[in-house]
Image (cartoon, rainbow, N blue to C red):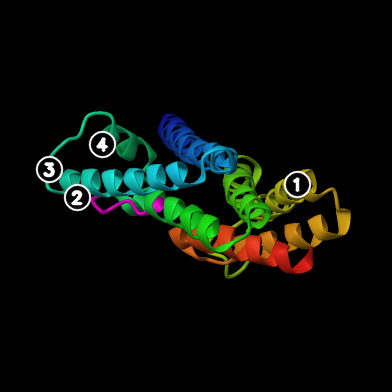
């Protein structure tokens, strides 16, 4: 019995480590999106076109992958980053991530778009990692979101917003709004809503 329990515990640890590794890889992509405002400031339209081409290229690779055609590098990245719920399905995460950034960049003033993209990159990205690593207490009705993850989201967005505007009050309100939005069970569509909604909210309160 003790041997069986040890084996089961070993399997659990491997699954947990694999889950954390996947989440770390996925959210590293989120965090890398924090460079987009810099590129938008340097070359606005070329950056937007690059995002559109990246979106189209990824979507084509995903359709081909589902047809059984393996695309070097892209298919491997998708396989590594895909969540369990995405197995044998079109992985929407990168699509909604790019769409959210493009919409924020097109509709919002540059400073608002920057805050919205930072909220997606750091708030949503670090919240998920924190929830996986140290999250113990879940929030009812949030589909597994944790208190630790939500507090991390608040802190990350507060700091990112303060770096943009140097206003504690505005940063506090923006952090709270991001935390509340991040708690909602939006699946991959939080990638679209967070940058647009938080960027718009920042514009209103500032």
> What span is in magenta?
88-93
Q: Secondary structure at mark 3?
A: loop
**Figure check: 189 above or below 114:** below
Which-is-in-front pick, marks 4 and 1?
A: 1
Q: Could you give the CA–CA distance between mark 1 and mark 3, rounded to whole angstroms?
A: 45 Å
Residue pointed to by mark 2: 63
Mark 4 crowd level (few <14, some 14–19, many ≥20, 10 Å Cα): some
Q: Is residue 191 visible?
A: no
Which-is-in-front pick, marks 2 and 1?
A: 1
Question: Looking at the image, which residue sits at the far right?
Answer: 168
Which-is-in-front pick, marks 2 and 3?
A: 2
Mark 4 or mark 1, which has the lower sequence index?
A: 4
Residue pointed to by mark 3: 68
Name which residue lies at 28% across and 35% down.
Answer: 74
Residue pointed to by mark 4: 75
Which-is-in-front pick, marks 1 and 3?
A: 1
Residue pointed to by mark 1: 164
Mark 2 or mark 1, which has the lower sequence index?
A: 2
């Amino acid at each position: 019995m003790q041997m069986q329990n040890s084996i089961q515990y070993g399997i659990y640890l491997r699954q947990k480590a694999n889950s954390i590794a996947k989440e770390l890889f996925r959210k590293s992509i989120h965090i890398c999106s924090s460079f987009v405002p810099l590129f938008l400031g340097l070359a606005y339209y070329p950056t937007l076109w690059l995002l559109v081409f990246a979106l189209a290229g990824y979507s084509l690779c995903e359709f081909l992958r589902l047809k059984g055609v393996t695309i070097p590098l892209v298919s491997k990245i998708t396989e590594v980053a895909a969540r369990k719920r995405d197995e044998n399905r079109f992985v929407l995460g990168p699509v909604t991530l790019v769409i959210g950034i493009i919409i924020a960049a097109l509709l919002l003033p540059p400073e608002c778009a920057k805050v919205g993209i930072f909220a997606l990159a750091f708030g949503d990205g670090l919240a998920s990692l924190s929830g996986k690593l140290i999250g113990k207490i879940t929030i009812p009705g949030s589909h597994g979101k944790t208190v630790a993850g939500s507090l991390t989201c608040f802190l990350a967005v507060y700091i990112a917003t303060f770096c943009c505007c140097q206003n504690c009050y505005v940063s506090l309100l923006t952090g709270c709004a991001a935390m509340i939005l991040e708690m909602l069970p939006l699946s991959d569509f939080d990638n679209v809503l967070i940058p647009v909604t938080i960027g718009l909210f920042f514009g209103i309160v500032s």
